[in-house]
């Protein structure tokens, strides 16, 4: 199966969106991604980050469901991906409703990237239990899946009887779920509750901030994907989708789209061998016009190039 490519909307563009987009629109952004061959269009989530985090490399984000709904209306086939939705930030029933609505109205194009979250100050601002986020994450997935089946969930935090949420998502049982993070808990969820994994390329310094283990080379990535798929096979489950932001992404900040393509293109076969099925790219384009130029370069050099494996 050929690698697929997911475009992460440039998170640095959100803060200055009116200047960045000019006379364009978010729908045009998504449509252009589809036209040049990207298979997915994704949005991050940070509803209320603190100023100190923002001043030290953090970023703002659009509401993922509002922005992906706009993208859905402007496109036909591209997958609409949360990269990622923090489960604990909202009731799983509100989350299930947003996901089901987007999936139905988009023609079944949602892929739901989920994470436990790591920004404690944001949890505090939203009045959510940070220390208990892991248990809430696990049960939140179960509650959402039950809701998408038209069933009720029985659990300690979110159990409720006598309720139903219609309409159901177009995707029977709900959209595919990808789990973000490198931790043992994240990898366990991939095996037990999900369909895919979004590991994070990061050195030890960044791992200390995101509170998830470091992952520094393709060999380590491949070993972990192999272990995940082996455990899933033992449980009678299929191999996972793996979406990965390439280790070479720093070139986008220090060079540009051409340099990034030159760095990543020779590595695509190695990523495939490691079990990666999706490559996620977040451009650093400073304007929508630059974004179009950068995506044209990536389309020619990566997205629409001959398969890494003949």
Image (cartoon, rainbow, N blue to C red):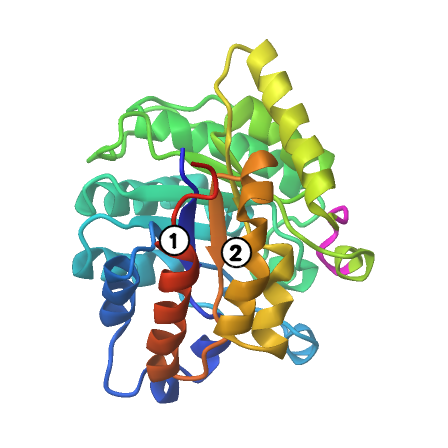
Q: Residue at x 34, y 80 (%)?
A: 288
Q: Are marks 2 and 1 in contact (CB under 8 Å)?
A: yes
Label for residue 305?
A: 1
The C terminus: image quadrant: top left
The N terminus: image quadrant: top left
Residue 262: image location, x then y, percent: 54, 65
Visible residue check, residue 82: yes
Residue 86: image location, x then y, percent: 53, 50
Earlier-in-chain disc, 2 versus 1: 2
Classed neighbour count for the residue bearing mark 1: other residues with Cα under 10 Å, few (<14), some (14–19), many (≥20) = few
| Dominant secondary structure of the residues highlighted in magenta in the image | loop
Residue placed most toward the observer, 39 or 73: 39
Q: In this figure, what is the number of numbered marks?
A: 2
Visible residue check, residue 245: no
Q: Is residue 193 above or below residue 241?
A: above
Magenta range is 209-214
Q: Assign a secondary structure to mark 1.
A: loop
Q: Which residue is mark 2?
A: 265
How far is the residue under mark 2 from the one under mark 1? 9 Å
Q: Is residue 166 left or right of residue 114?
A: left
Residue 140: image location, x then y, percent: 50, 35
Q: Assign a secondary structure to mark 2.
A: helix
Residue placed most toward the observer, 125 or 235: 235
């Amino acid at each position: 199966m050929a690698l697929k490519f997911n475009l992460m909307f440039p998170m640095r563009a959100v803060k200055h969106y009116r200047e960045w987009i000019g006379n364009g629109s978010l729908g045009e952004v998504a449509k252009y991604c589809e036209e040049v061959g990207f298979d997915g269009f994704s949005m991050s989530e940070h509803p209320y980050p603190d100023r100190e985090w923002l001043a030290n490399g953090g970023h703002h984000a659009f509401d993922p469901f509002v922005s992906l709904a706009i993208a859905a209306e402007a496109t036909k086939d591209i997958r609409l991906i949360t990269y990622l939705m923090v489960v604990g930030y909202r009731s799983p029933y509100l989350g299930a409703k947003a996901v089901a609505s987007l999936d139905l109205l988009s023609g079944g194009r949602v892929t739901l990237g989920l994470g436990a979250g790591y920004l404690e100050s944001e949890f505090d601002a939203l009045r959510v239990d940070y220390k208990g986020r892991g248990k809430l994450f696990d049960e939140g997935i179960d509650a959402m899946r039950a809701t998408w089946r038209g069933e009720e969930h029985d659990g300690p935090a979110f159990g409720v009887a006598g309720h139903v949420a219609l309409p159901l998502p177009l995707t029977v049982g709900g959209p595919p779920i990808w789990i973000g993070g490198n931790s043992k808990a994240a990898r366990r969820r991939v095996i037990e509750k999900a369909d895919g994994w979004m590991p994070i390329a990061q050195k030890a310094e960044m791992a200390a901030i995101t509170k998830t283990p470091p992952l520094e080379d393709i060999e380590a990535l491949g070993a972990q994907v192999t272990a995940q798929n082996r455990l899933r096979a033992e449980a009678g489950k299929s191999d996972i989708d793996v979406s990965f932001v390439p280790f070479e992404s720093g070139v986008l900040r220090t060079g540009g789209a051409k340099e990034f393509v030159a760095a990543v293109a020779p590595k695509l076969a190695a990523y495939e061998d490691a079990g990666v099925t999706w490559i996620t790219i977040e451009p650093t384009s400073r304007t929508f016009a630059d974004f179009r130029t950068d995506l044209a370069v990536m389309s020619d050099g990566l997205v629409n190039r001959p398969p890494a494996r003949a």
